[in-house]
């Protein structure tokens, strides 16, 4: 019983740490050699989703505020990047200046969304945040008149790729005799930022702030009665989550080179929420695993066409349909058999054990 | 028995009697159009045990919530140790030394017993003193000691009530506000919980107890107020109230 809640883990051994670092450093090359360049690209995208999921995890997993409009912050970060680094306004500000700006602005909008929803919880909060997400998307879709801010549904094209110290991440570079392609370099940049987001999440989880969030999630009145400023801490959760969302949005814009409102629909918010729920809400390893799984699994399921051809000699079900069907089945199966998520935290596992027992 | 005030002599006992720790004055609270509490005034002196009794829906919890800053009163004032608390948010009220033990216990169910107790000391930074207080709480509540690593949600109702009392004590409050601590507990457990409340009060902490169980409340406290439909109809010495025919009829089942 006591082992269930013992939160102190043994310090990771440096050797394990070194091997993990080496593995992560070599991963894009291994993937490139084994599966092809497109999978390295996918790896980059998976890292983006890890950042997004960890951001939403602060709001949903830590503070317990069900946010269905999270993608709005992702969109804000992306549009800020596009406005300041594309021919749309003719601005080409450097990457390091725009990224914090987009993240900061998203954080501000997080507070803006949080303020009117402080009294709401659960379903009601979900509906308001869902509305917020849709409002932002619809704004982006329609703000091409009277002043063309977003170029409407056509989106903004030719967004500058990330350029760090004269190195553009859209072209290959040779270093120490190795040739690093753009997607490889992007991988390292995203990995670095993802690690930063993981580090911040870990520090938050085990801080006074993190404990206060747990208390608010469990019993808001009791939390206030112990002297926790519930209003500020909820706003902080919204702001932190939104900041990570904005950060990922900026990276997404520079990575794709093109953004349109289409990329920021409700389905996207739900996918990010699924990553958290499926992986293990409030538990960093679970959330990372969920994000990787839900980014890579749908892609892997594209091969269902090949499998059918190999098995039956012809394609019976369009892989595009089958893929989503299998994906949905996988979600249902996980929720039935591992309701606390694939890698749940001790606390959350307890929560579901309570519900059953 | 009028005692003249004696010049500049330090007379803390006297001052304590003159300035109440908690002074609620003409408090009115409404939910929408429904008047829940009207013109309510009550006082608690330092170290005193006072109860507020009344039937279900009389406005007891509403009064407590308004004192704690959990709901905004329509009119009236709340002073604690001479300072106005009116319209301060709940966490600010808590930081000034009022500890609320909410109705229905309010443990953090998925936190361990030890984590729950430490949340009580959330606003404090004095680690050494916190550790000492934690030991004291465990001494006061030995049942919790055995269960310190267990999730609070797995404790029995009485143990949860004790845990919340312990958590409140971890804030080193000067006034403990208890909302129906006997609710839903077995008679034996009620007695155990009230023993603990008396021990806490014996340590110098003032208590404002809200109870439907008037018999128990009047037996425990020195003074009491009777709340009916949002208005205080009777107040005074607990023994006098317990002897009052109206109280006996309405609340003591006679």
Image (tube, rainbow, N blue to C red):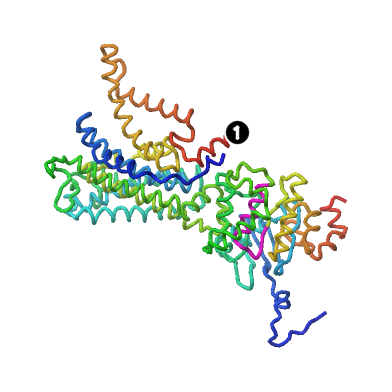
Q: Name which residue lies at 16% across and 43% down.
A: A170
Q: Position of residue A122 (x, y in %)?
A: 50, 44
Q: Name which residue lies at 78% across and 64% down.
A: B223
A317 sits to left or right of B82: left
Above-or-below relation of A34 to B242:
above
Q: Name which residue lies at 84% across and 62% down.
A: B239
- Let me know if residue B175 is in the magenta part: yes
Whether residue A173 appears in this view of the structure is yes
Q: Position of residue A75 (x, y in %)?
A: 31, 46
- Let me know if residue B207 is in the magenta part: no
Q: Name which residue lies at 63% across and 62% down.
A: B67
Q: Position of residue B111 (x, y in %)?
A: 55, 47
* In the foreground, A318 or B159: B159
Q: In the displayed image of the protein, which residue is found farthest to the bottom?
A: B7
How many residues crowd around disc 1 within 10 Å: few (fewer than 14), some, or many (20 or more)?
few
Quadrant of the frame with the N terminus of chain B: bottom right
B7 sits to left or right of A114: right
Above-or-below relation of B199 to A61:
below
Magenta residues, as a range? Answer: B159-177
Above-or-below relation of A299 to A225:
above
* In the foreground, B152 or A70: B152
Q: Which residue is mark 1?
A: A357
Q: Position of residue B108 (x, y in %)?
A: 57, 48
* In the foreground, A244 or A338: A338
Toward which corner of the image does residue A267 lie, by quadrant?
top left
Whether residue B39 appears in this view of the structure is no
Chain bearing mark 1: A
Label 1, secondary structure: give it.
loop
- Total labels: the figure holds 1
């Amino acid at each position: 019983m006591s082992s269930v809640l013992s939160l102190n883990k043994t310090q990771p051994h440096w050797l394990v740490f070194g091997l993990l670092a080496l593995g992560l450093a070599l991963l894009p090359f291994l993937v490139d050699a084994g599966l092809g360049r497109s999978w390295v690209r996918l790896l980059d995208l998976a890292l983006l989703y890890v950042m997004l999921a960890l951001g939403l995890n602060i709001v949903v997993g830590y503070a317990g505020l069900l946010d269905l409009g999270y993608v709005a912050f992702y969109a804000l970060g992306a549009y800020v990047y596009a406005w300041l680094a594309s021919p749309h306004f003719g601005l080409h500000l450097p990457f390091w200046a725009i990224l914090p700006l987009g993240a900061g602005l998203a954080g501000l909008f997080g507070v803006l969304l949080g303020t009117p929803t402080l009294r709401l919880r659960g379903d009601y909060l979900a509906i308001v945040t869902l509305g917020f997400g849709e409002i932002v998307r619809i704004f982006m879709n329609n703000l091409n008149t009277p002043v063309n801010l977003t170029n409407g549904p056509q989106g903004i094209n030719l967004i500058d790729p990330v350029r760090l110290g004269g190195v553009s991440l859209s072209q290959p570079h040779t270093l120490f005799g190795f040739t690093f392609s753009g997607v490889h370099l992007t991988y390292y940049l995203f990995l670095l930022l993802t690690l930063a987001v993981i580090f911040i999440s870990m520090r938050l989880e085990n801080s006074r702030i993190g404990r206060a969030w747990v208390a608010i999630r469990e019993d808001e009145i009791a939390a206030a009665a112990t002297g926790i400023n519930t209003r500020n801490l909820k706003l902080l959760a919204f702001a932190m989550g939104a900041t990570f969302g904005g950060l990922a949005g900026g990276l997404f814009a520079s990575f794709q080179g093109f953004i349109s409102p289409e990329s920021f629909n409700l389905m996207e918010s739900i996918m990010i929420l699924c990553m958290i729920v499926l992986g293990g809400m409030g538990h960093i390893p679970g959330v990372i695993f969920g994000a990787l799984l839900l980014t890579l699994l749908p892609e892997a399921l594209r091969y269902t066409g090949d499998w059918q051809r190999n098995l039956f000699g012809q394609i019976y079900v369009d892989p595009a349909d089958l893929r989503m069907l299998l994906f949905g089945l996988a979600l249902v199966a996980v929720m039935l058999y591992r309701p606390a998520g694939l890698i749940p935290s001790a606390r959350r596992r307890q929560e579901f054990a309570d519900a059953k027992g | 028995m009028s005692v003249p005030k004696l010049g500049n002599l330090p007379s803390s006992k006297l001052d304590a009697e003159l300035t109440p720790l908690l002074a609620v004055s003409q408090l009115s609270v409404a939910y929408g159009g429904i008047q829940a509490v009207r013109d309510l005034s009550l006082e608690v002196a330092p170290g005193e045990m006072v109860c507020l009794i009344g039937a279900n829906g009389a406005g007891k919890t509403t009064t407590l919530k308004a004192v704690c800053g959990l709901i905004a009163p329509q009119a009236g004032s709340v002073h604690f140790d001479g300072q106005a608390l009116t319209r301060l948010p709940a966490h600010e009220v808590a930081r000034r030394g009022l500890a609320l033990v909410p109705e229905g216990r309010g443990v953090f169910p998925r936190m361990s017993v030890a984590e729950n107790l430490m949340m009580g000391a959330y606003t404090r930074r004095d680690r050494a003193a916190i550790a000492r207080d934690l030991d004291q709480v465990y001494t006061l509540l030995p049942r919790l000691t055995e269960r310190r690593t267990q999730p609070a949600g797995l404790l029995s109702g009485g143990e949860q009530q004790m845990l919340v009392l312990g958590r409140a004590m971890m804030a080193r409050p000067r006034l403990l506000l208890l909302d129906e601590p006997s609710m839903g507990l077995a008679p034996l457990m009620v007695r155990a919980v009230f023993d603990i409340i008396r021990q806490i009060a014996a340590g110098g902490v003032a208590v404002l107890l809200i109870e439907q169980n008037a018999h128990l409340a009047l037996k425990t406290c020195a003074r009491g107020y009777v709340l009916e439909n949002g208005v205080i109809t009777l107040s005074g010495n607990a023994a006098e109230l317990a002897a009052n025919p109206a109280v006996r009829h309405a609340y003591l089942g006679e």
